[in-house]
Image: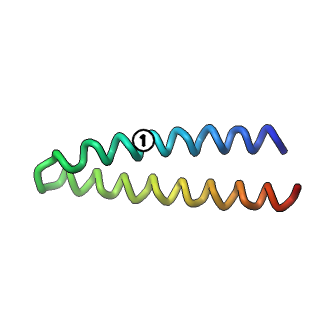
C-alpha cells in the first residue's frame, strides 16, 4: 500500500506544480484561444488532483 500511496503523492505533486505554472502564465495571456486552452488545462489539472485525493483517501481508509 505504501508504494501506491507514494506514487499517488508524487503524481499529485507534479499536478500541483503544473497548476502553479499555469496560474502564473494564464493571467499574462491576452484573451483568445491560447488563454481558453490554458483555462481548460487548469480545470483538467484540478480534476486530476481531485481524483488523486479521492484515491489517497480510499487508500487511507483501507489502512
The quarter of the rendered structure image containing the N terminus is top right
Compare residues 41 and 46 and report the one nearer the observer: 46
Q: Is residue 44 left or right of residue 48?
A: left
Q: Residue visible at 42% across and 41% down?
A: 18
Seen in the picture, residue 48 relative to 28 is either above or below; the reply is: below
Seen in the picture, residue 12 relative to 50 is either above or below; the reply is: above
The quarter of the rendered structure image containing the C terminus is bottom right
Task: Using a 10 Å C-alpha cutoff, classify the residue at mark 1 as few (fewer than 14 neighbours), some (14 to 19) or many (20 or more).
Answer: some
Q: Residue visible at 62% across and 54% down?
A: 52
Give x and y (percent) for residue 45: 45, 52
Which quarter of the picture shows residue 36? bottom left
Q: At numbered mark 1, what does the secondary structure look like: helix, strand or loop?
A: helix
Q: Residue visible at 86% across and 59% down?
A: 62
Give x and y (percent) for residue 41: 36, 52
Q: How many marks?
A: 1
Give x and y (percent) for residue 51: 60, 59
Q: Residue visible at 59% across and 41% down?
A: 11
* Residue under pointer 1: 18
Q: Is residue 20 left or right of residue 15?
A: left
Q: Is residue 40 left or right of residue 56?
A: left
Q: Is residue 32 left or right of residue 52?
A: left
Give x and y (percent) for residue 40: 33, 58
Task: Return the residue found at the far right.
Answer: 63
Which quarter of the picture shows residue 8? top right
In this figure, which colouring scheme has been used for the structure?
A: rainbow
Amino acid at each position: 500500500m505504501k508504494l501506491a500511496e507514494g506514487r499517488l503523492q508524487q503524481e499529485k505533486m507534479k499536478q500541483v506544480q503544473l497548476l502553479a505554472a499555469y496560474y502564473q502564465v494564464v493571467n499574462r495571456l491576452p484573451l483568445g484561444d491560447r488563454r481558453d486552452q490554458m483555462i481548460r488545462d487548469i480545470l483538467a489539472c484540478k480534476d486530476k488532483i481531485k481524483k488523486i485525493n479521492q484515491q489517497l483517501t480510499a487508500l487511507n481508509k483501507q489502512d
